[in-house]
Image: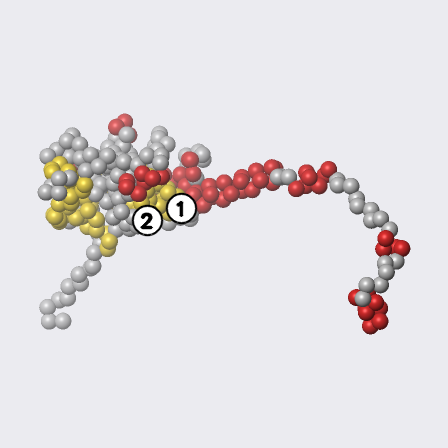
Amino acid sequence: MSEDRITVETGAPPTPEALAPIDIPASDPGDADARSTNWLAELRGLAMMLLAVIAFHSLIAKPFYIPSISMMPNLLVGDRLVVSKYPYGWSWVSASFHVLPRSNAKLLGRTPEYGDIVIVVPKGREDDYIKRVIGLPGDRIAVINGQVVLNGKPVPQVVEPPLELPVDANQPCAPEEFPGLRFRAADGRFYCELPILRETLPNGATYRVIDHMQQRFDNMAELRIPAGRVFLMGDNRDHSADSRVPTEEEGLGGPVPLSDVGGRAEFVTFSFNGSESWSPASWWGALRTNRSWTRLRPMIAPTIVTKPAGK
């Protein structure tokens, strides 16, 4: 075998078989089709990806946009936030685009906690509202001069320093909404000076609210929240169509069924001041940098345990 290898390497003359012409098969037109795009497979892949996104938004979490001032000072117009869909179970409202018929059924249903910020779809509407849970099933709730009275006890409210928000396109501090609260600071910019109250619910959930005007929903006769329902209010108590407000006035019309609650607000991803356009070059200048990753779950105030004297 070593001799054969040496012969080949030293250039022995080719055999007649080696000089025979080589047959090259003609190209098959089907090969070009095989190399072209399989549009059916591409469309199938896109459809599967779209279904995966819809399933994630329906079952796990979904981004939302804040278009109103009803949850100020904790949520501002222009905030983008993430709402988790699973904390209270799943119902008709969980599905993206609300394609399912309205129903009272709930899969793995759980009751929200005091102070949770939730997404809800009012009866007769398709819009998502965002409000805070103030009353739970079985509670007695009333509002007297703007203060919530829960099970016969006023919910504590403590005055905090005013919050100065820069005036922008998404927060113009309109006189009809915030009378007398707009001012020009030493830096030449306009600000909205919001009077702040800190409210604390029975479980220790504490958060800021605004209540700076006298209006007819500052008072509400006591009612008992039925089983399977929760009472919701906006943090901006003077400009919120919530459970205090009749459905004819675009409110929630009282306590809402748990099956209409679609999820819990978790955190702000980013926020725009309203100066952005379709051009990505404008987005950085419109970004409210101090809003990104703001946590929306309420803080829990420490519980003070008192001991009898001498122990």
Q: What residue appears at the point 82 percent right and 46 percent down from the top-left corner?
A: 23
Q: Amino acid at mark 2?
A: Glu
Q: Position of residue 35 (x, y in %)?
A: 66, 42
- In the picture, measured across the screen, residue 123 lies left or right of residue 5, that is left
Counting residues from the N terminus, which is met first, the one under dot 2 or under dot 1? 1
Q: Position of residue 1 (x, y in %)?
A: 84, 71
Label 2 element class: strand
Residue for badge 2:
266
Pointer 2 with pointer 1, Cβ within 8 A: yes
**Res. 45 visible in picture:** yes
Q: Amino acid at mark 1?
A: Ala
- In the picture, measured across the screen, residue 42 lies left or right of residue 266, that is right
Q: What residue appears at the point 21 percent right and 56 percent down from the top-left corner?
A: 301
Q: Position of residue 159 (x, y in %)?
A: 11, 48
Residue in the foreground of this view, choosing between 23 and 286: 23
- Give the quarter of the image for residue 28: top right
- In the picture, measured across the screen, residue 23 lies left or right of residue 173, that is right
Label 1, residues with CA under 10 Å away: few <14, some 14-19, many ≥20: many
Q: Position of residue 290 (x, y in %)?
A: 25, 48
**Res. 89 visible in picture:** no
**In the picture, which quadrant includes the C terminus?**
bottom left
Residue for badge 1:
61
Residue 119 numbered tag: none
